[in-house]
Amino acid sequence: MLCGCQQAMIFGDNRVRRVIGAYPDGNARKTIMSRLALLIVSLLFFFSAIVASGAATTVTIGEYFSETDVTAPIMINDVEELAAATIKVSYDPAAVVVTAIDNGVSGSFIQNSQYAHDGWVKMAWYLVDGSLNGDVTFALLAISPSGSYGDYSDLEIEVETLSDTEYQTIDADIINGFVYRGMNGDVNADRVIDAADSQYIANSIAGILGYPSKFGPSEVSGDGTVDAYDCVYLARHATGVPGYEHLK
């Protein structure tokens, strides 16, 4: 006799030829369904965490090609209920120096420019009541060249505090910037954009001594990386090939 948990194929000679499947009893079925539900919930949590991992809020400072002073706003974009922030900006004092800091928002603003000539400044801000939303101009940095033509400095942001009205941390992606005292593409700083600049980039990529990396003026293709394509792009730009008129 067949048990209640099996299926079989019965042929004309009344013999069981093959058992083709089995299904669990009630208790086992409940256990399997519970485990399946737990697995589904775990997967949903995992994928939602992946989607949420990329912060919508960004903190940026910009990219600058200039032989003279520039004003660099520190922006906090796509933020909700911003109530306090502390941000530090570091740079190469041999190339540039922050000469003045202005607050870009209302509220209590404290600046520390005591170490500006050592290569960093820090700003703190908070609101007693209320909050800010959207795109916020946190501060304005006046940056002056301290070296010579062709000098380059990264502008590196460090967010020490970014919190809402409940004192909860606001996650944010940081987008650093740079200042290059010269023209975009003039990597070797001879005031001419030509094949020598393409060669400089190639030498820098290869790690040849005497060709330090200058990300700003070297990344001319606009794809976010410095590689052989930038050498090709810059060479085509310098020779007037159609489609390569613009750098970045």
Image: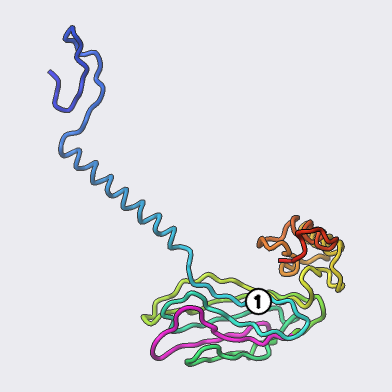
Extent of the magenta region: 118-144
Magenta region's main secondary structure? strand
Q: Is residue 30 left or right of residue 74?
A: left
- At mark 1, the secondary structure is strand
The N terminus, quarter of image: top left
Is 238 magenta? The answer is: no
Residue 245 percent across, percent down from the top left: 77, 64
Is 135 magenta? The answer is: yes
Residue at 14%, 26% in the rendered image:
4
Q: Disc count in the image?
A: 1
Residue at 72%, 69% in the rendered image:
216
Q: Which residue is mark 1?
A: 155
Q: Residue furthest front?
A: 242
- The residue lying toward the viewer, choosing from 20 and 233, is 233
Q: Is residue 243 left or right of residue 126?
A: right
Residue at 54%, 84% in the rendered image:
138
Q: Residue furthest left?
A: 1
Q: Quadrant of residue 154?
A: bottom right
Residue 230 percent across, percent down from the top left: 75, 59
